[in-house]
Amino acid sequence: MHYKLATRFGRNAHQISGREPLDNEALYRHVPSIFAREAHDSRSERYVYVPTIDIVEGLRREGWSPFFAVQSVPRDGSRHGHAKHMLRLRRDDGIGKPEAAEVIIVNSHDGTSAYQMFAGMLRFVCTNSMIAGERFEEVRVPHKGNIELDIIEGVFTVAEDFPRLIDASESMKAIHLSPDEQRLLGEVSLVARYGDDESPVRPEQIIEPRRREDVDRSLWTTFNVIQENVVRGGLQGRKRNAEGRIRRAQTRAINGIDQNVTLNRALWTLAEGMQRLKAA
């Protein structure tokens, strides 16, 4: 099996991804909270518990397979087996295509998250995994009621948005950006990443491609380059310390699941904003 243990989420998470669907042995070795058989002790009797692996098995029967899984590492060691986790599932029909539409599932069994489902896309050339913005379907299922059926129905609800998702990516591919427009998208993306804090890198750095295939001025490629640079980190920059002195600094990867989801969706929304600006 072609699996790899990646480190994009840093030391605060365990992660595995593969070119082939992940089997239960691989999932259990790296993301054990998916297999928790009961909720954390802090949950009340009203909490309806369904192991995430049961959802995965149900979706496998419907033709969906997990290709990526990550689990956070909570500071409270007692929550490790119930920690927040994220899976990316898709149908194995993207052979020969540059991208594949995915369903992203986020959950925990310690009360920190309901089941959440989002639409996303995987770009094979760089294994960039994007999450669509707020215009696309999002489903949340609290831990109560007929939860297992609701979750599986939620996956199909999200998947109904796949044609619109693919259309959006194709539209972005057809839009050409000038260097100034690329820089503008880089600027607003740094605001999404750092907020009011000073960015250690310049917009020109995050629009710089990491590979030859990304030397392209389309909105889609520029967005992907920015997303990869911002999420993976590792860029050399400068940062002002508490004494006001300028020091060399390296940008950090996005480690947390929540931060990854939020930032990914924000970057997609910014790309859509540029798309509307170009169409005006």
Image (spheres, rainbow, N blue to C red):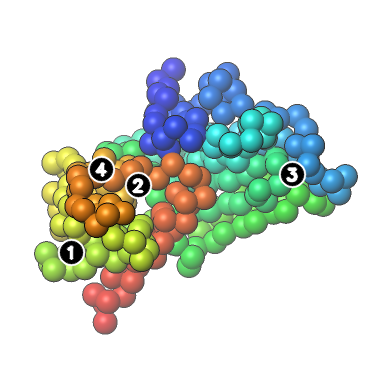
CA distance for labels 1 and 4: 20 Å
Mark in front: 3 vs 2: 2
Query: Can you give x and y, in whole percent of width and height, for residue 171 in the image?
Result: 30, 64
Callout 2: SS: helix
Query: Which residue is pictured at 86% across the width and 49% down the height?
Result: 46
Q: Which residue is mark 3?
A: 148
Q: Which residue is mark 4?
A: 250
The disc at residue 183 is: 1
The disc, 3 or 4, on the residue closer to the chain's N-terminal end is 3
CA distance for labels 3 and 1: 45 Å
Mark 3 and mark 2 in contact? Answer it, CB < 8 Å: no
Q: Amino acid at mark 3?
A: Glu
Left or right, 60 with respect to 270, comes to right
Comparing 166 with 48, the one in front is: 48
Q: Amino acid at mark 2?
A: Val
CA distance for labels 3 and 2: 32 Å
